[in-house]
Image: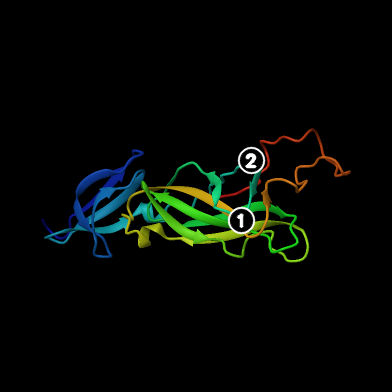
Amino acid sequence: MPGANIYIIKNKSNNAIAISSFIRDTGTVGSTVPANSIIQLQSSGANWELITSSASRLSNKSYVQTFTQNKVFDNGDAQLLNLFPQLTIQPNKKVKLTMYIPTRADTRNWGGLFVNVNVNVNGTWYNLGNTGFDSGAMNNGAGIIHALNHQMLLDFVQHLNLDPNLPYTIQFELTARSHTDATYVNQGHRMNDTSNNLGSRGGYNDGLPIRTIAI
């Protein structure tokens, strides 16, 4: 084929489609067009080479996943904090995981909640470590009402060698244990209290607040 041949392929479906193999600018071989995207291929005379792909210009998306159940954790074996629904991530996108978990410890010893992060990527489970001492109610000598705030920047495409032209699925699971004595989650904060002369309008609706953000 002459070197000037250029093909523009548009995939209007919600699923990736298979085509003849081509070479990306990274030197790797591709054979799919991502869902709802456009690619341009040019023939070098021997191979098809990728010129551009709209998949790399997809805008970022934000997902908010919550749970409002009251939980109590001790310093024994870890218990399930929450298993969140599966998400589909756009091709070649990183994931920024942001966790906000209200915690309370009434102990006068070192309190705090260790949160372990597991993730299922395309059907396989991986461990991402834990929050360590960034654990919300961590104090010595006084009770404390606080929250766990923790972030992770995750590049699954690079570290798991995923196809950058294909979407992938993730599902987060959080397990937890207390550092010392009991740590309470989603309770004992009065953060949903409509009294105390706060100027509240109407009654409290438990379905509206975002109390724990996973992603």
State whether residue 215 appears in this view: no
Residue 68 vs residue 133, the one in the foreground:
133
Left/right placement of residue 106 relative to residue 3 reads right
Residue farthest toward the front in the current orientation of the protein: 76
Q: In the depicted view, which residue is nearer to us: 195 or 188?
A: 188
Please say if 130 is above or below 85: below
Question: Could you tell me if residue 1 is visible in this image?
Answer: yes
- Taking 37 as reference, is 93 above or below it? below
Percent x, y for residue 179? 63, 60
Label 2 amino acid?
A: Gln
Q: Could you classify mark 1 by the number of other residues whose Cα lies within 10 Å: few (under 14), some (14-19), or many (20 or more)?
A: some
Image height of 69 relative to 151, above or below: above
| Residue found at x 33% / y 50% | 166
Is residue 210 left or right of 64 when viewed as pictured?
Answer: right
- Residue found 58% across the figure and 54% down from its top: 76
Question: Taking 7 as reference, is 154 left or right?
Answer: right
* Marked residue nearer the N-terminal end (1 or 2): 2
Where is residue 128 drawn, in percent x and y?
46, 59
Closer to the camera in the image, 3 or 177: 177
Q: State the CA–CA distance, disc 1 to disc 2.
A: 20 Å
| Circle on res. 75 | 1
Which picture quadrant has residue 205?
top right
Residue drawn at x 64%, y 57% is: 148
Secondary structure under the numbered disc 1 in the rendered image: loop
Residue 69: assigned label: 2
Name the foreground residue: 155 vs 14.
155
Residue depicted at x 25% and y 58%: 50
State the image coordinates of residue 6 (x, y, percent, origin top left).
21, 54
Q: Amino acid at mark 1?
A: Asn
SS type, badge 2? loop
The numbered mark at residue 201 is: none
